[in-house]
Amino acid sequence: MVRIKVNEGVLEGSKVDNVYGKPYFSFKGIPYAEPPVGDLRFKAPKPKSPWTGVRQAKEHGPESCQYDVIFTQSTEFIGKEDCLYLNVYTPNIEPENPLPVMVFIHGGGFFCGSGNSERYGPEFLIKHNVILVTINYRLDILGFLCLDTEDIPGNAGMKDQVAALRWVQNNIRNFGGDSDKVTIFGESAGAASVSAHLVSPMSKGLFKRAIMQSGTSLCPWAQTYGARDRAILLARELGCECKNDKEIFEFFKNQPAINLVNKKVQITFTERAKLFPHVCYGIVSEKKFEGHECFIEGDFFDLMRNGNCIHEDVEIMNGYTEDEGFLYFALGSPVDEVFKQASHFAQFFVPHDIMNHVPVIEQMSLGTKIKKYYSKDQFVNKECNFDELLKFLSMDYFIHGALSWQALCAKRNKNKCYLYKFSCKSERNIFAHNAGCSFIYAHRTPVSHVDDLFYLFPASISLPEVDMNSNTYKMIEQVTKLWTNFAKYGNPTPDDSLGARWLPYTAEQKHYLDIGEELIPGTSPDEEQIKFWEEMYREYCPQKLW
């Protein structure tokens, strides 16, 4: 039994043995804000009121309302609206010097996931003498519906994350942490969230370092457009024909939560026609209302290109896996149907932001050009060119956004920024298998979207314990050392102990690190593809060229 005093009251946690070495203290289910229910639904969270007595912190708090279609492929509705809880894992409550803090923001397309230890346990990272914080935040419609009104302004889930970061600033010293050495990191939608915090005025000063894994604010799914139109169409689909904004808010406020989860509302024909489930509710450009904080105002690309918007002096890591595109199949897109679309429709290959800016006749021409580049004039099918289609999907949904972000950040030259490509291969690379693509393992081990997480967290819900004498564990130690070195020093390789020096990315040199069984420094990753995409944007959509 261990007790800690935080600003809101006393918490009782527990001491946990760690099969991988270092024991730690665990405090789960800590409320960081008031439950966002009733009149607080869709609004920014309110600070948590103090409690009396001792609050037990040995079990996770509820997850946000969701159907977990990514990680467990479940059709069961889970979670509660009262979901604003976080978990703190610390190796030492009274260290000689305050410890660096790593705050993880989970992914899941802004519509599923949680920070619970079954997926994001501390056992690997905590060995390196850092504190790990994981959080839950509102998801899907409850977290990201936007009517462009004071009652439903949007970005509630992002404001939850800000509230959690403010709680960390106010309380982490009581767990042995250093509030001046906070690193935020996340994967997929969690990485896009990290990227958004780097430019949000609400987040300024709440962290020192940031790591984006497989996602940035410039990925095509990260920022939601037409948010008000979606909200009105959703209201109609649920039976509300009101035209008055107040009445629409009252309608949404009084709906059971289960009616407001997993309702995909597309507002363009392309969103409906493409097999990839569009992120209908995510980060939006927010309207300002007097007396209310605005999370982000404007288009992320314009903010990055035109202004000095990234918080200065924040050190950054950004990267992606070899085979990001397997996520396409994990979200319910059957492989054969994807290839049917890719074979029949040239528009399948047109990037989303170009599609929004050029007429159909130009889309057809461009789609044909991209299809030819990736298929090498072969008929598009699973047997001939699955890997080539995967390269396109990876570039379209993740890599182009990551490298565009990196290039724009390097241009302003005010943030030390590291770039990586993740290529670790072992029995922990399981996401492609879960996505229904087991056939790929017959000729290679893919490094899918999500696979990098299994080298940072035990993921006990999906994987068994790791043999600490295995080559796999050596890779885990190497990856966690890079991440925690960055959290401690702002440099993932401050010395030669890992056998390689990872140099910061610059506009001139474009340094990066290939993180596999070996650490291999290089320059200009995926250079041939990037040149092709730059030429494509220069011709068809120069306003989106970095």
Image (spheres, grey):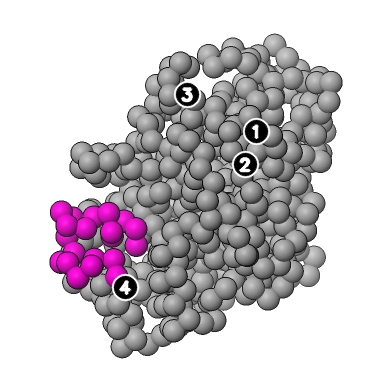
Q: Give the distance between the C-alpha atoms of the residues marked 2 and 1, in whole angstroms.
A: 7 Å
The image's mark for residue 501 is 2
Q: Residue at x 77, y 58 (%)?
A: 312
Q: Earlier in the sequence, mark 1 or mark 3?
A: 3
Which mark's residue is nearer the viewer, 1 or 3?
Answer: 1
The residue singled out by tag 1 in the image is 496
Q: Earlier in the sequence, mark 3 or mark 4?
A: 4
Q: Is residue 534 left or right of residue 289?
A: left
Quick one: 152 or 434, which is closer to the camera?
A: 434
Q: Residue at x 51, y 82 (%)?
A: 542
Question: What residue range appears in magenta?
Answer: 373-392
Q: Earlier in the sequence, mark 1 or mark 4?
A: 4
Which image quarter is the N terminus in?
A: top right
Residue 280 picture location, percent across and down: 45, 63
The residue singled out by tag 4 in the image is 370
Residue 64 picture location, percent across and down: 53, 43
- Determine the secondary structure under disc 1: loop
The image's mark for residue 473 is 3
